[in-house]
Amino acid sequence: EMKKGNLPPDVLSRFFVIGGECNYLLRAELVPTAEDGTEGRLVLAFVAGESWKTTEMLSWRDEDIQSVLERGAKALKEATQRLRMPVTIIRKERAVGVVPTQTLVTVEDLDEIVLSVHDQLHDVPVPFCAFNSRSDVWLDIGSKGKGIKCMLQHFNISAAEALHFGDELYLTGNDRGSRESCCTVWVENELETPFYLRLLLKMKTGEVE
């Protein structure tokens, strides 16, 4: 329905995407494509960080962020070399990751890399999230927990009114931090999320107890 542009404007205006754990926010917008404005194209537009990030996040200094990323890249490189795992190192504005170039990589190897990063970066000045995404390993500045707090502040709602769905809640996953900010449902995969949402809606309307 969103792709077709059939959602009412008040519903569409409440759809946001937060990415990079907590580093950017996108808002759904319908951009007119016809001169009379009767047709539209759904886009995701960036929202300026100053309007939604918490005071804590806005206080993070760029030099501290870069220091964490540099140390993270070094830790990732050392861990993969110790495991004799060939990888490609990818550096982003607020993240650094390693992507294995060989096909036979175990989950345990990727977990070992994450745990090594945790051990080496326990004293950094800026929060980070290092996690195993099952095919590679990433270190992002911030965490999903920080991102949820941003959304609570942005929408002026309490933690009791929020619910997070995640499938990576173990020690080396990136959903674990969400538990510090609101109630979290541990799902097996993304297909379970709409099931639970429909169930919650039915409970709210009294269709199920």
Image (cartoon, grey):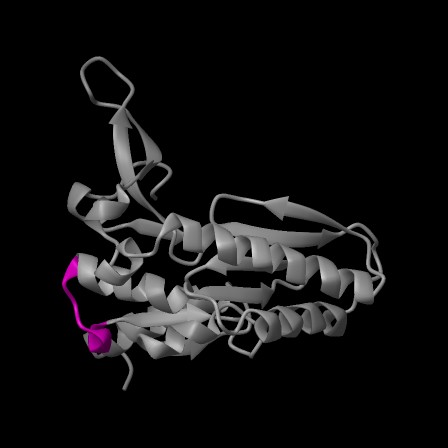
Does 58 sit above or below residue 171?
A: above
Residue 161 place in picture, x, y as percent: 21, 73
- Name the residue rendered at 80%, 50% in the picture: 101
Left or right, 209 with respect to 92, comes to left
Q: Quadrant of the C terminus?
A: bottom left
Q: Quadrant of residue 126?
A: bottom left
Name the residue: 30% across, 36% down. Answer: 5
Instruction: Tell me, yes or no, whether the highlighted magenta stretch contains residue 156.
Output: yes
Q: Is residue 143 visible?
A: yes
Q: Quadrant of residue 183?
A: bottom left
Nearer to us in this view, 98 or 183: 98
Q: Is residue 182 magenta?
A: no
* Residue sitting farthest toward the bottom: 209
Residue at x 47% of width, y 67% of height: 124
Q: Position of residue 33 (x, y in %)?
A: 29, 19
Q: Position of residue 180 (x, y in %)?
A: 35, 78
Chain part drawn in magenta: 155-161
Q: Visible in this render: residue 136?
A: no
Left or right? Give the position of 130 relative to 102. Answer: left
4 relative to 134 in the view: left or right: left
Q: Quadrant of the N terminus?
A: top left
Q: In the rendered view, would you say 129 is above or below 49?
A: below
In the rendered image of this protein, does residue 50 appear above or below residue 76? above
**Residue beneath the point at 50% across and 55% down:** 67
- Nearer-the-camera pick, 104 or 142: 142
